[in-house]
Image (cartoon, grey):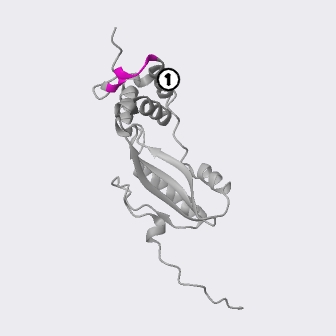
Amino acid sequence: MPRETGGPSSGWWAYLEDRICEQVDADVLRDRPLSAVRTVWEALRPLGVGLHEAERVVHARYEALGDRVQRTPPDPLDLASLAARVAALPGSVAAVEAFWDGDTVHDWFVLLVAVMDPPDGESHLATVYHRPDSSPPGAAAAKAGRALAGHLGVPFHFASPDVPDDEAPRWRAVRRPEEGPCAQSDG
């Protein structure tokens, strides 16, 4: 009996061994898309399948398994939760930033991060996906980011809140250069 294809773009599904299909479906049902994509890609790479096509296979499995997928709850965006995450970070927060990213499993989503000074770098605070029962990811991330930045007394940066753009300039690229050391006064 032919195996269920899982959707129109998943023709490669039929090339996978049963044990690989079971592993992929187990990852999809637990909402672990990256693990599922890695498994598909590693199994089909000898046939010339690229990463993008492996993502399509997994996306088709998400569609085929539908409501059976145990979706990961969204990251909390309330001020108390975000402030608690920031409090656990090493160093000081220079800014709060939101920016777009995306993949074929989740489509576009927004990452909310604390830009650190020092140590230089950034710390993930939340990933905001499109959810049918909530605000668009850009609006939700902007609201949460502005609230957190205001609470911390640091700038908030979101170069493209209304339109997904993963090439929009990041905060460190657009912030004004330091004006140099300031003379301190005693009075």
* Residue 11 falls within the magenta-colored stretch: no
Q: Magenta stretch containing residue 13, yes or no?
A: yes
Q: Nearer the viewer, residue 37 or 108?
A: 37
Judge the density around disc 1: few (<14), some (14-19), many (≥20) Cα neighbours within 10 Å: some
Residue most toward the top? 1
Left or right: where does residue 135 sit relative to residue 146? left
Q: Residue at x 49, y 46 (%)?
A: 127
**How many labels, in total?**
1
**Is residue 29 shown left or right of residue 90?**
left
- Foreground residue among 73 and 41: 41
Residue depicted at 47% across the width and 35% down the height:
38
Would you place residue 98 above or below residue 176 in this image? Answer: above
Instruction: State the quadrant of the N terminus.
Output: top left
Regarding residue 19, the answer to whether it shows in the image is: yes
Residue 55: quarter of image: top left
The answer to which quarter of the image holds residue 162 is bottom left
Residue, disc 1: 23
Q: Which residue is at a point 47% across and 66% down the rendered structure image? A: 171
The three-letter code of the residue at mark 1 reads: Gln
Which percent across, then down, holds residue 26?
50, 23
Element class at badge 1: helix
Q: Does residue 136 appear in this view?
A: no
- The range drawn in magenta is 12-18
Rendered view: 148 above or below 56: below
Residue 41 position within the rendered picture, expressed as x and y whole percent measured from the top left: 42, 33
Q: Residue at x 36, y 22 (%)?
A: 15
